[in-house]
Image (spheres, helix red, strand yellow):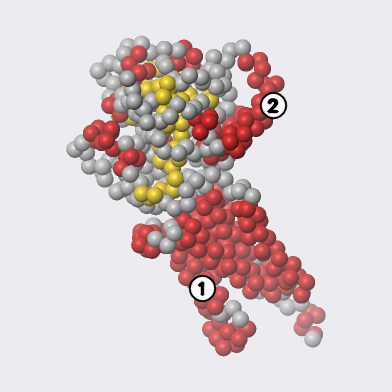
């Protein structure tokens, strides 16, 4: 039996009433605006708008949550614009239904699957994680998802599988930010196999008990809480198991600033700003940044013997 | 001229009033401290560039009235730069002097911003008529420091950005044009002026 310190209150009730009301207004407005467009697809909708009876993970933090509004209006998702508020504004053009994901590379069972088929065998749970952005701000977010390792195992990786590469949808029609070469599209991210199989690494499909909004990486995104946020790739269409370390988007853009590992590390500064402290959104004073974003007990052994100054 | 100066004075204050209104209404977004710093920095830079418009405008059109607004625009640029710097020291770092010093020494974009501010400081201090008289011909040489200050301010912005350089480059182009136009030959005096 799991003994949890958290009470049995669903996150919707923990949220301040004002924010909760705001969230409904937001959803209501989105539904009203997109209602006509959404209706023809409604029959295919396999993901519910709200996820009920979510299992609560003991891996969740008990820290106070950031509001739904903060989490969904302050985003780095350059495919939908480079301003923090651009993704929320432009998310409407992203069509997440139907959605399919290709699994390929060093697996015994490659193929392209609809999102519904991909998710079917997995029990969704709530994971409340800290998210630390490389820009020195952080949030606490109640994700809905399942362990990435469980998904990878289903496709029987072969012995050649050393890394997992993820690719975001590349469609400038739906993602206006891709019409300019701010980064080398499509966005690619990757993990070493042991990182990907770690129980803290999840694929998320929702937040605050609801389906992910476009600006947060709908319909399927990675969440790796001990790494800087840019590793947690959004709107995934492809998962490839590879023998070589995949070339990742920000690393290609500025290799001296963004490493492949990108573990949260207060001892290694970004060349242009300090990583020693961070601003938790909603707090006035900065707080100390913790090694591996406070998940060192669980993940530090993955990097034993590695020089983290070199492998930043 | 009097009414024009008053109008420009009020116009220069509107960004600050607007910022206070947004703050009071809680409309500064999820990261209000960052929003305040960026906003004040944007306006410091815009007003600094506006200060540099007077001379090329005179060279191109012969108008002298923009030159008479120049001091006020420059002082407002300095005013917003002071607020920008204060918001960084107080709101962002909360007087953590050790970290602020490390930022100035180790982060080129902050070094440049601080240098730009230090170059503007003597200009603001010697902006009065009395200073102009006292410094004589040195005043003009001293106030040419606005050129390196503006270049440093644009560099400060450019080096801060992660990947999308559109906005800082927009300001860089404007600055290049404003500096380039100064190389134009001075316009011949208007005949009317010559007769007087």
Q: Up-down: is A230 above or below B140? A: above
Check if mark 2 and mark 1 are on a common chain: no
Horizontal side of residue A131 vs B25, given as left or right: left
Callout 1 secondary element = helix
Instruction: Identify the residue at horizontal 62%, vertical 15% (top origin).
Output: A42
Residue A302 visible (yes or no) = yes
Question: Among all residues in the image, which is located at the extreme bottom?
Answer: B134
Left or right placement of residue A143 versus residue B58 in this view: left
Q: Chain of mark 2?
A: A
- The crowd level at tag 1 (other Cα within 10 Å; few <14, some 14-19, many 20+) is some
Q: Which mark is residue A238?
A: none
Which residue position holds label 1?
A: B121
Residue B176, can we see it? no
Instruction: Quadrant for residue A119, please give it.
Output: top left
Q: Which residue is mark 2?
A: A32
Does A34 sit above or below residue B109? above
């Amino acid at each position: 039996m799991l003994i949890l310190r958290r009470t049995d209150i669903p996150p919707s009730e923990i949220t301040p009433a004002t924010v909760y009301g705001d969230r409904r207004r937001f959803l209501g407005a989105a539904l009203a605006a997109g209602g006509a467009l959404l209706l023809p697809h409604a029959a295919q909708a396999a993901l519910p708008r709200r996820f009920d009876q979510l299992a609560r993970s003991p891996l969740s933090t008990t820290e106070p949550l950031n509001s739904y509004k903060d989490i969904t209006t302050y985003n780095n998702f350059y495919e939908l614009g480079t301003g923090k508020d651009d993704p929320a504004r432009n998310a409407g053009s992203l069509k997440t239904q139907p959605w399919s994901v290709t699994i390929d590379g060093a697996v015994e069972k490659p193929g392209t699957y609809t999102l519904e088929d991909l998710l079917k065998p997995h029990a969704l749970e709530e994971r409340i994680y800290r998210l630390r952005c490389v820009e020195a701000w952080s949030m606490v977010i109640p994700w809905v998802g399942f362990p990435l390792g469980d998904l990878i195992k289903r496709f029987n990786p072969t012995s050649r599988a050393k890394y997992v590469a993820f690719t975001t949808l590349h469609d400038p029609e739906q993602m206006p930010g891709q019409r300019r070469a701010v980064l080398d599209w499509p966005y690619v991210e990757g993990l070493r196999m042991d990182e990907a199989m770690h129980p803290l690494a999840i694929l998320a499909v929702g937040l605050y008990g609801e389906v992910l909004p476009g600006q947060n990486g709908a319909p399927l995104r990675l969440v790796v809480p001990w790494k800087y946020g840019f590793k947690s790739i959004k709107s995934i269409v492809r998962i490839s198991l590879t023998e070589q370390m995949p070339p990742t988007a920000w690393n290609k853009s500025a290799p001296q600033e963004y490493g492949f590992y990108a573990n949260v590390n207060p001892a290694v500064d970004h060349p242009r700003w300090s990583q020693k402290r961070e601003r938790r959104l909603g707090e006035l004073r900065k707080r100390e940044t913790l090694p591996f974003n406070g998940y060192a007990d669980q993940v530090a052994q993955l990097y034993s013997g590695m020089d983290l100054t070199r492998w930043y | 001229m009097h009414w024009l100066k008053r109008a420009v004075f009020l116009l220069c204050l509107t960004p600050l009033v607007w910022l206070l209104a947004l703050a009071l209404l809680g409309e500064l977004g999820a990261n209000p401290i960052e929003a305040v710093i960026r906003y004040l920095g944007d306006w410091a830079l815009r007003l600094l560039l506006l200060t540099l418009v007077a001379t090329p405008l005179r060279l191109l059109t012969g108008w002298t009235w923009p030159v008479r607004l120049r001091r006020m625009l420059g002082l407002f640029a300095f005013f917003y730069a002071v607020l920008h710097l204060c918001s960084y020291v107080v709101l962002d770092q909360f007087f953590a002097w050790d970290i602020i010093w490390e930022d100035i020494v180790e982060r080129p974009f902050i070094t440049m911003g601080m240098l730009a501010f230090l170059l503007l400081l003597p200009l603001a201090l010697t902006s009065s008529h009395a200073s102009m008289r006292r410094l004589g011909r040195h005043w003009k040489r001293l106030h040419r420091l606005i050129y390196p200050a503006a270049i440093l301010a644009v560099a400060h912005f450019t080096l801060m950005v992660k990947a999308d350089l559109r906005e800082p480059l927009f300001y860089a182009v404007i600055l290049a044009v404003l500096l380039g136009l100064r190389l134009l030959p001075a316009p011949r005096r208007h005949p009317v002026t010559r007769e007087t």
